[in-house]
Image (cartoon, grey):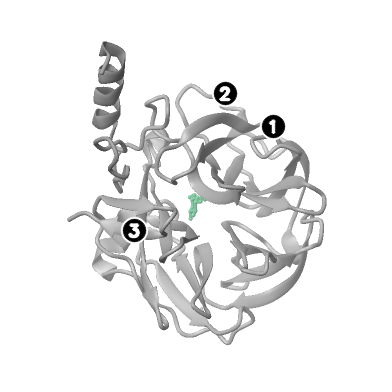
Amino acid sequence: MTRNTLCLSIALLASGTASPAGAPPVVRPGEIWPDDRGQHIQAHGGGIMKVGRTYYWFGEQRRQGLDPGRRYVSCYSSKDLVRWKFRGDAVDLADPEQLGPRWVLERPKVFHNRKSKQFVMYAHLDDARYKAARVAVLVSGKVTGPYRYVKSFRPLGRESRDIGQFIDDDGSAYLIFEDRPLKGFHIAKLSDDYMDVEKDVAVIRAPLEGGAVVHFEGLYYAIGSALTGWNPNPNKYATAEKLEGPWSEFKDIAPPETRTYGSQSTMMLKVAGKRATTVIFMADIWKPKTQWDSRYLWMPLEIGRGKLWLPEPSPWTLDVKSGRAEILK
Ligand code: GAL
């Protein structure tokens, strides 16, 4: 080993995701998650999509020193979902709708439209008081961006705050959005070109945000968090045989007193490998006063036969080829 590679190995080991040669890299929930530059990943309220064999993670870019008048969405890429390369800011945007100081661009999610070959990003667009309640649509011909702002609207004419993304096994694309006047959330199908929200598939009358859906062994599972702003609460799940419902009652995903171990859901990611399928619960541990230091809680879920449970956070490894996750006690 040369002096340089030795230094690099020591730096990577210290940074948390690396592991001794050959061993799979480790996910450490709640800790600093360094990217390829050794900097904490800034992809809050994020979403992940796959192009070929590469995963892309988009999220709120909240590093220190940003222009306070602009909003940014970061992009990272990875082949193993653990070691992430920073690909730059996919969005670098000035207030597009005169929303005023402290305007909001949150929870970005990117959909790949195979027909138009465009990447279409949805994000929650709002003013400082969260009264506009709209979605923004941005487009790029390249997955990493830059994404061009196209328009904003209220999906199906409804107030929309937290959004989520669901791609079904048949490739159909859905936007999940919270609807405050309804005290519930929608799972709504996108139009063919993904530039619009076409129709409700399910309207679930449970006051939940941070909505996430996964299809696993013939059942749909939906997760959401209660409406407590940046403060964590007990996230809940329900199941349905069809996306349309009927949906079951909502139940806790973890001991309620842990308030989801201090986190809030943003997505469930299904990793189907050659031997197993792992569903990852992706959540944010928000630090509202120091957002650049907000952390991630990713854990493989115990899921199946209508039950879903978030194990107590602990370091774990993932092998995307086999689809196996292993929790290290
Ligand atoms: C939460 C929401 C976050 C952010 C925050 C602002 O309820 O999930 O994405 O909007 O409120 O208070």
Dot placed on the residue nearer the N-terminal end, 1 or 3: 1
Quarter-wise, where is residue 225 in the image?
bottom left
Check whether the beta carbons of the residues at disc 2 and disc 3 lie within 8 A of each other: no
Query: Residue 216, how many percent across, how many down?
Result: 49, 73
* Residue in view at x 81 percent, y 56 percent: 193
Q: To which residue does mark 1 refer?
A: 146
* Amino acid at circle 3: Ala
Quadrant that contains the N terminus: top left
Report whether residue 232 is seen: no
**How busy is the neighbourhood of tag 2: few (under 14 within 10 Å), some, or many (20 plus)?**
few
Quarter-wise, where is residue 288 in the image?
top left
From the viewer's perspective, tell me whether residue 262 is left or right of residue 186.
left
Rounded to the nearest angstrom, the CA distance separating label 2 from label 3 is 39 Å
Helix, strand or loop at mark 1: loop
Quarter-wise, where is residue 64 in the image?
top left
From the viewer's perspective, tell me whether residue 261 is left or right of residue 215.
left
- 219 up-or-down from 64: above or below: below
Dot placed on the residue nearer the N-terminal end, 1 or 2: 2
From the viewer's perspective, tell me whether residue 278 is left or right of residue 134.
left
Helix, strand or loop at mark 3: strand
Closest to the camera, between mark 1 and mark 3, is 3
**How busy is the neighbourhood of tag 3: few (under 14 within 10 Å), some, or many (20 plus)?**
many
The answer to whether the beta carbon of the residue marked 3 is less than 8 Å from any atom of ligand 1 is: no
Q: To which residue does mark 2 refer?
A: 67
Q: To which residue does mark 3 refer?
A: 325
The answer to whether the beta carbon of the residue marked 1 is less than 8 Å from any atom of ligand 1 is: no
From the viewer's perspective, tell me whether residue 94 is left or right of residue 277.
right
* Amino acid at circle 2: Asp
